[in-house]
Structures are given as structure tokens and as C-alpha cells.
Image (cartoon, coloured by chain):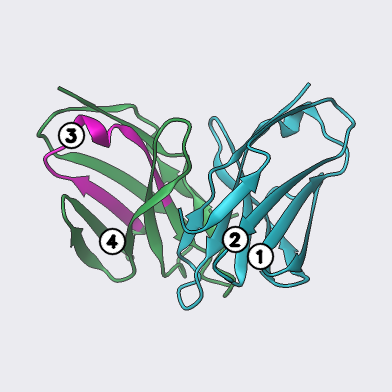
């Protein structure tokens, strides 16, 4: 499982509430990524990080922010959740020396009512 | 916008047959290509990576890459019911060094006994 955990694994929330998803890795890798997966859209990159406090936007970053204050943790925040953000969220790590190769966490299923 | 295209399927093959999965991509400078397998309700699992033109074999799996045609494929020999899953093609962003990947929508494979 590449030493990646995500929390929570399932969450139901209401429109307009803030939500934070956590990705934790035990292998000290530099690169971390947040994706969302929706039927008909495959995996789409939300944000990524290439080091502590170094982050950048991906393809679908609107409505999301991220933070990385420690190597092992990458947080994804929905500032004000909307129903369109109902999705399955996956975190991935890129192993140093072969950063294009990504390994995924177990995912978080988020439902926004 | 970089695109990765896959037939969504479903692709249905009998047990023991060869399953052929195809993927085309738009970014001519991409250098790294990946196939992931995703079982229903699970996270994507890396099964093959390929970087050079030609074939790469790993057990029952063979990845084929043709950069001139911007085409990558995955062959699964002696298909088993346990191979039934969604197969995701991923291509790196050749213009950056952050390991970003673009994924296709995935092909659903069903292997029937």
C-alpha cells in the first residue's frame, strides 16, 4: 500500500461547510498529489506538492486549497463544500528518483448534501 | 489541454483469451507511460510502466509504446476472471519535472468464464 493513509475514509457533509481531508505517508517522499475521481472523468489532478510548503494547482483546483507543513502530511481543504465536490478523493505519492511513478492511497468518499 | 483517450468499454473477453486495451495521447513530449488497474471500490494499482518504443513484458502483461503514433497499449494474455477491472492509462506531463500525470477515463474489462 506504499505507506499511504487517508482520513477520513468516508464523510458526509452539508453544502457550505468546510472540509479537510488528510493524506499521510510514512516513506518521506517529496512529491504528493490530490486527485478526484468521478464517473466519466477518470482521475483529475486537483493540487500537487513538491516539498514542504511547495504546492501548485492542477487541472481542477477551483474551490480547493492545500497545505503541506510536514513532509508526511498533505491536506486538502474544501473551503465551502458544494454538491459538485461530491466525489472520491485519492492521494498519491511520487517516489524519489522516479517521480512520474505514482502510488495511491485508499481514497476518501465524500458526499456533499 | 493535454488529453489521454481510452475506449470506455466495456470490453468483454472469454477466460484464456487475450485482452487488448488501447490508449492515445496528445502531448508529444510525454516520456513516461503507465497502466493502472482499479477494482471496483478500490484505489488504482500500478501494473506496468513503459518509457521506450517497443514492447515491455511482465508476466501475462505486455505494454506496447509507439511515440510516433502517440499510442500505448496493454495486452493481457490468458485472461482470468480476476483481471476484470477498470484499466487506466496515464501519461506524464513532459513539459515539467513534477511528475504530473494525465489519466484516461479508463476501460472496463470483463473476463467471463
**Vertical order, A32 against A43 (above or below):** below
Please give the residue where the numbered disc 3 appears in the rendered image: B80
Marks 1 and 4 share the same chain:
no
Of marks 1 and 3, the one in the foreground: 1
> Circle 3 — which element?
loop
User: Which colour represents chain A?
Assistant: cyan
Please give the residue where the numbered disc 1 appears in the rendered image: A72
Please give the residue where the numbered disc 4 appears in the rendered image: B65
Q: Quadrant of residue B80?
A: top left
Cα distance in 3D space between marks 2 and 4: 32 Å
Marks 4 and 3 share the same chain:
yes
x, y percentage for residue A64? 79, 48
Q: Quadrant of residue B20?
A: top left
Determine the chain carrying the residue at label 2. Answer: A
Q: Which residues are magenta?
A: B71-89
x, y percentage for residue A60? 70, 47
Of marks 1 and 4, the one in the foreground: 1
Q: Is residue B83 magenta?
A: yes
Dot 2, how many residues are within 10 Å of its Cα: few (below 14), some (14-19), or many (20+)?
A: many
x, y percentage for residue B1? 60, 54
Cα distance in 3D space between marks 4 and 3: 24 Å
Q: Is residue B50 visible to the viewer in this orientation of the structure? A: yes
> Circle 2 — which element?
strand
Amino acid at each position: 500500500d506504499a505507506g499511504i493513509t487517508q482520513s477520513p475514509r468516508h464523510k458526509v457533509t452539508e453544502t457550505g461547510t468546510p472540509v479537510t481531508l488528510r493524506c499521510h505517508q510514512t516513506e518521506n517522499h517529496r512529491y504528493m498529489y490530490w486527485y478526484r475521481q468521478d464517473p466519466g472523468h477518470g482521475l483529475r489532478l486537483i493540487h500537487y506538492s513538491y516539498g514542504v510548503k511547495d504546492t501548485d494547482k492542477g487541472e481542477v483546483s477551483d474551490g480547493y486549497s492545500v497545505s503541506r507543513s510536514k513532509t508526511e502530511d498533505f491536506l486538502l481543504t474544501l473551503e465551502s463544500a458544494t454538491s459538485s465536490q461530491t466525489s472520491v478523493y485519492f492521494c498519491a505519492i511520487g517516489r524519489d528518483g522516479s517521480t512520474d511513478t505514482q502510488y495511491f492511497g485508499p481514497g476518501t468518499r465524500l458526499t456533499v448534501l | 489541454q493535454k488529453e489521454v483517450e481510452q475506449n470506455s468499454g466495456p470490453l468483454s473477453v472469454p477466460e484464456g483469451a487475450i485482452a487488448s486495451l488501447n490508449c492515445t495521447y496528445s502531448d508529444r513530449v510525454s516520456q513516461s507511460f503507465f497502466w493502472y488497474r482499479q477494482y471496483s471500490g478500490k484505489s488504482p494499482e500500478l501494473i506496468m510502466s513503459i518509457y521506450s518504443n517497443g514492447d515491455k513484458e511482465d508476466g501475462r502483461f505486455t505494454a506496447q509504446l509507439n511515440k510516433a503514433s502517440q499510442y500505448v497499449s496493454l495486452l493481457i494474455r490468458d485472461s482470468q476472471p480476476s483481471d476484470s477491472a477498470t484499466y487506466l492509462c496515464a501519461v506524464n506531463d513532459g513539459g515539467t519535472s513534477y511528475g504530473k500525470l494525465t489519466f484516461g477515463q479508463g476501460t472496463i474489462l470483463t473476463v467471463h468464464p
